[in-house]
Amino acid sequence: MSAKNLKLHVSRNHAKAHPYPLVGVIMGSQSDWETLEPAAEMLNQMGIPHETRVVSAHRTPDLLFEYASGAERRGIEVIIAGAGGAAHLPGMTASKTLLPVLGVPVESKALKGLDSLLSIAQMPGGIPVGTLAIGKSGAVNSALLAAAILGIKHPDIREALRKFRQAQTNRVLGVPDPSEISQSKSKFRARSPFGKRPSSKRKTGTGKSS
Ligand code: RP5
C-alpha cells in the first residue's frame, strides 16, 4: 500500500518517538467518517500517530486483503475498523492479520446499528474482534482501548492515557453539584470529547445535597 493513498496523522511532539502510524483507522464507507472521526480526534489527543482510510469489505475486497495482510509489516500495532449494516469489515480484517482489531458498529438507518453491533460482536470462536459500543461513544472508546493496548509497550502512550483518565476524573469531581453545570457549561463544552452541550434539564427537587 503506497503512503500517498493514506491520510497520515502524526503530531509533531510524538513524531520523533513514533515516526510511523501505530494505529490504522479504517471504515467501510466515506459515510462512516462522521462516526469514526471522534476516534481519530481521541488518538490525536493521546498523541498517537495514525492513518485513516476507507476500505470496504464488499466494494474493495482486494484492498481489504492488501491492507490487513500488510498492516503489521508497515508498523501498525492496532487496527480500528468501523462499519455499518452487514459490517463484515472488522471480522474480515481480523482474519487476515494477527494484530488486535477493534470494531466500531456504525449506526445504520434501518436498524439503528443493532445489525452492525451483532455482526461485529458475533464472530465465531477463533477470530476475535474487540467490539465497542454503537456510534461515536464506541469510536472514542476504540481509541482509548487502542491507547491501553499500545501503552503496554509504549510508556509515553500509557502516561498520556493516565493523564486523560485523571483529567476526566477531576472534571467529574470538580462539579459535584449538577445544578452548577449550566453555569459552567461553556467550559464543559470546550472540554467534551463529543462536543455536545450537556443537558440543561433538571430533575425535580433542589438537586442539592443536604
Ligand atoms: C457499510 O455500509 C459501511 O460501513 C456503511 O456503514 C454502510 C453504508 O455505506 P454507504 O452506502 O453509505 O456507502 O459498508
Image (cartoon, helix red, strand yellow):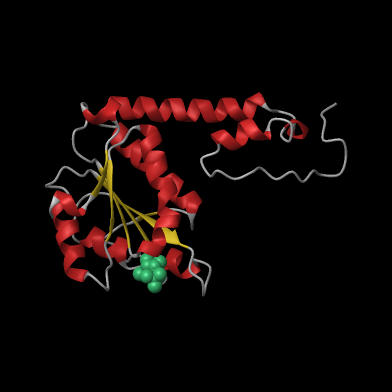
- Quadrant (top left/top right/bottom left/bottom right) for the C terminus: top right
Q: Determine if residue 114 is in view.
A: yes
Q: Is residue 57 left or right of residue 170?
A: left
- Quadrant (top left/top right/bottom left/bottom right) for the N terminus: bottom left
Q: Position of residue 205 (x, y in %)?
A: 88, 40
**Residue at 32% from the left image edge and 30% from the top image edge:** 157
Q: Please say if 159 is above or below 178.
A: above
**Residue at 53% from the left image edge and 68% from the top image edge:** 112
User: On the image, which quarter does residue 179 sit in?
Assistant: top right
Q: Position of residue 182 (x, y in %)?
A: 73, 36
Foreground of the two, 90 or 84: 84
Q: Position of residue 40 (x, y in %)?
A: 37, 45
Q: Please say if 192 is above or below 29.
A: above
**Residue at 51% from the left image edge and 75% from the top image edge:** 110
Foreground of the two, 50 or 8: 8
Q: Position of residue 84 (x, y in %)?
A: 41, 66
**Ligand 1 image position (quadrant):** bottom left
Q: Is residue 206 left or right of residue 122?
A: right
User: On the image, which quarter does residue 198 sit in?
Assistant: top right
User: On the image, which quarter does residue 28 sit in?
Assistant: bottom left
Q: Is residue 198 left or right of residue 34?
A: right
Foreground of the two, 16 or 86: 16
Tally of marks: 0
Q: Determine if residue 142 is in view.
A: no
User: In the image as oriented, which residue stretches furthest toward the front?
Assistant: 4
